[in-house]
Image (cartoon, rainbow, N blue to C red):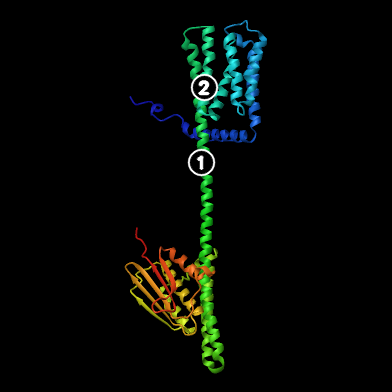
Amino acid sequence: MSPHPADDGAPDHDWSAGAQPLTRYVERGVQWVRSFDRRRPLVWDLLLTGFFVVAAFIDVAGDGWRNITENENVPLWLVYAMTVVFSVPLLWRRRHPLAVYGVMAVTTLVNAWTGAALQASLTLLIVVFNIAMRLPARTLAWTYCLTVVPSVVGHIRYPQGSWDQQVVPMMMSFAIVALMGIAFRTRQEYMASLVQRAKQLEVERDQQARLATNAERTRIAREMHDIIGHNLSVITTLADGGSYAAAKSPERAAQALTAIGTTSRQALTELRRLLDVLREEAPETAALTPQPALTDLDQLIDGVRSAGLPVRSTVRGRPDSLPAGRQLTVYRVVQEALTNTLKHGGPEATAYVDVAYGDDGVRATVTDTGVGGPPTADSGGRGITGMRERTALYDGTLEAGPRRKPPGGWQVELHIPKESTQ
């Protein structure tokens, strides 16, 4: 026989489709209750306490407690008094859990001794839950031990059946409530640790952003110093030379003015390139104007020569795809060294530039025969400091100081190792 169509194994209703929205509603409800409780804890305490006060007094006023009591001769005033102590102190269970527990534990002992067996005594479970959530485990341990005492006393005073029927259920109830409190506490601590970690990550991101900002400011300061300092030194030297040559050799003065114009345009081009990098609305423009590279060294040296400084240069080896950042560093160091010679070398100074590419990286040496010398890093200038900062970015070394052999002049030595392939 073929199976009945309704028994084909498919469920009559897809309960998972409705369970997911229901779960979301429950989670939202729990989050709303927690948020409300954090904002207005007194309102929640009043609602909870009022509920148990009403429930306890209904049980007493309706004589419901007589259905399970072990001693109906307990004075009614004592029953009402115990009902008040079991319910009203719940209002302070979170702020003073131990004090509330102490008062209610004594009342629980009286409840067991008299045999009233009021159900309101179960509110002690709520206090134990709060102790498990807020106080150390050692406090919870002795609290749990004291909680078992009234059950033992009640069994001794009014024995009904075996002891495990009276004592063990109460012990299990308090143990479950304590474990629930510990679980809630662990979850709260975990969530607090996540929040703390998120704050730490935010602080770290802010610190990294500040460090990146400072590094970018330093980089821009170096670029501005190199661009403006070098080109203004060349322009100043050309202008001084042109003013001296204007009276005797107008042609030389005209050449100096032409060189000043060329150098100024180069400086403006480099400044525009640097400023375009800082403009978020024009990243494509910045990408079309690359930074100076080692292929531009000849143009740099020609500009220095036109300013009146004789420069010889030697290039050994090939760059072999040297990264752009390292090329820019070598270019700027050579530029800064020649600028210092222009400014401080004197009228008879000459310079020599040697660039060598080897297995250990690139080396650049700039020497001059000037009678003076550039300012040191301690004199407030940014030149040598900027060169050292650039070099340190690529784990390189830079030495700058007076020449020893032959005496006189200044020498700058740069070494940048090859980029690690690891």
Q: Count neighbours of disc 2 (C-alpha within 10 A) and say few if under 14, some if 14 to 19, many if 20 or more.
A: few
Which residue is found at the position 65% from the left and 11% from the top?
78
Of residue 60 and residue 180, the one placed in the foreground of this image is 180
**26 and 339: which is toward the camera:** 339
Is residue 285 shown to the viewer in this render? no
Percent from the top left, x then y, of residue 380? 54, 69
Q: Nearer the viewer, mark 1 or mark 2?
A: 2
Q: Which label is found at residue 194?
A: 1
Residue visible at 53% across and 59% down in the picture: 213
Q: Amino acid at mark 1?
A: Leu
Give the spatial CA distance, label 1 vs label 2: 31 Å
Q: Nearer the viewer, residue 50 or 361?
A: 361
Q: Residue furthest right?
A: 77
Residue pictured at 53% horizontal, 18% vertical: 146
- Residue 157, picture quadrant: top right
Answer with the quarter of the image where residue 64 lies.
top right
In which quadrant is the C terminus drawn? bottom left
- In what element is the residue under mark 2? helix
Q: Is residue 313 above or below residue 53?
A: below
Whichever of callouts 1 and 2 sits on the residue coming sooner in the sequence is 2
Which secondary structure lies at badge 1?
helix
Identify residue for label 2: 142
Residue farthest to the top?
73
Query: Viewed as shown, does residue 280 lie left or right of 63?
Result: left
Location of residue 272 in the rendering, given as x and y in whole percent from the top left corner: 54, 72
Residue 296: quadrant of the picture: bottom left
Instruction: Name the kind of residue labelled 2 in the image.
Output: Trp
Q: Residues within 10 Å of mark 1 (few under 14, many from 20)?
A: few
Q: How many marks?
A: 2
Relative to residue 374, is residue 37 depicted above or below?
above
The answer to which of 390 and 302 lies nearer the viewer is 390
